[in-house]
Amino acid sequence: MSPRRSTDPEAATFTERARRQQLIDCTVDLISSRGFPSTSLAAIAERAGVSKAAVLYHFSSKDNLTRAALTQVLEQFGGYVRERVERAPDPLAAVVAYVHAMIDYQRDHRRQVRVITEMLLDDAGGTRLKTPGQHDTYGRWQALAALLEEGQRAGVLREFEPRAVALAIGGAIDGVIGHWLDHPDLDLDAAAAELETFTLNAVARRD
């Protein structure tokens, strides 16, 4: 009888955790280079140098493995943005830091961005979400809305509806990144500067 995989992640051995991480990394590589539909369990197993049965030992299906890969990418993305926002000296600077961090991460992690777009957008041109609101996994707009509310409480931002403005800023960022993915000649540094101006014009208090 083959050994059973522990259902408790904390109980996994170092070797099991390392193998799971290897499989997730291979999945990210394949989705980013081949696309989601062409990333099969057999292809992942071949890339990792293990059998398909070994993949299924750690992840019971392609869906579970690809979701684990997406979760890791989104957690890393969120951590990157959060770290830079927390270093900002004041609420207005935190909003600006959010905008630049969103652009900087995606500029420097194109593979991870491809995983997000492959898994969350439909196959017809990648412009429509498979599930509306799915891109806000891990509270993306909520995090920005909280920053905006903090700025309002501090008196440095004008009065507005934080959710609507957070969605508008997030949509502007997504639009710039979406264009850049298709047209890599776009100057993202210049685009980030314009997004900063756009955001400040939208939220800053004017006395």
Image (spheres, rainbow, N blue to C red):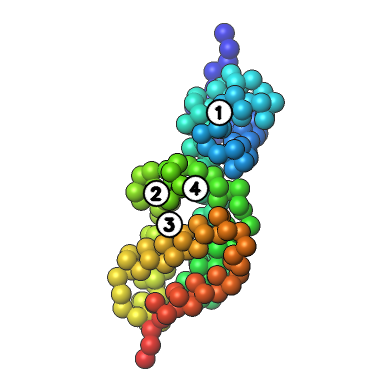
Looking at the picture, does residue 21 appear above or below residue 202? above
Verify CB contact (< 8 Å) between mark 3 and mark 4: no
Of the image marks 4 and 1, the number of the one nearer the N terminus? 1
Of the image marks 1 and 3, the number of the one nearer the N terminus? 1
Does dot 4 land on a helix, a strand or a loop? Answer: helix
Q: Residue shown at 55%/50% (left/top)? A: 113
Q: Residue shown at 52%/37% (left/top)? A: 36
Q: In the image, what residue type sits under mark 4?
A: Thr
**Quarter of the image where one finds residue 151:** bottom left
Q: In the image, what residue type sits under mark 2?
A: Arg
Neighbourhood count class around disc 2 (C-alpha, 10 Å): few under 14, some 14–19, many 20 upward: few
Q: Which residue is mark 1?
A: 40
Of the image marks 2 and 1, the number of the one nearer the N terminus? 1
Outermost residue, right direction? 49
Looking at the picture, does residue 132 appear above or below residue 193? above
Q: Which residue is mark 3?
A: 140
Calculate the distance from the C-alpha at mark 2 to the C-alpha at mark 1. Answer: 23 Å
Verify CB contact (< 8 Å) between mark 4 and mark 1: no
Outermost residue, top direction? 1
Outermost residue, bottom direction? 207
Q: Position of residue 125 (x, y in %)?
A: 46, 47
- Viewed as shown, does residue 48 lie left or right of 11? right
The answer to which of 174 and 139 lies nearer the viewer is 174
Q: In the image, what residue type sits under mark 3?
A: Arg
Q: Residue shown at 63%/57% (left/top)? A: 108
Of the image marks 2 and 4, the number of the one nearer the N terminus? 4
Q: Which circle, 1 or 3, is nearer the viewer? A: 1
Q: Position of residue 53 (x, y in %)?
A: 58, 18
Q: Which residue is mark 2?
A: 128
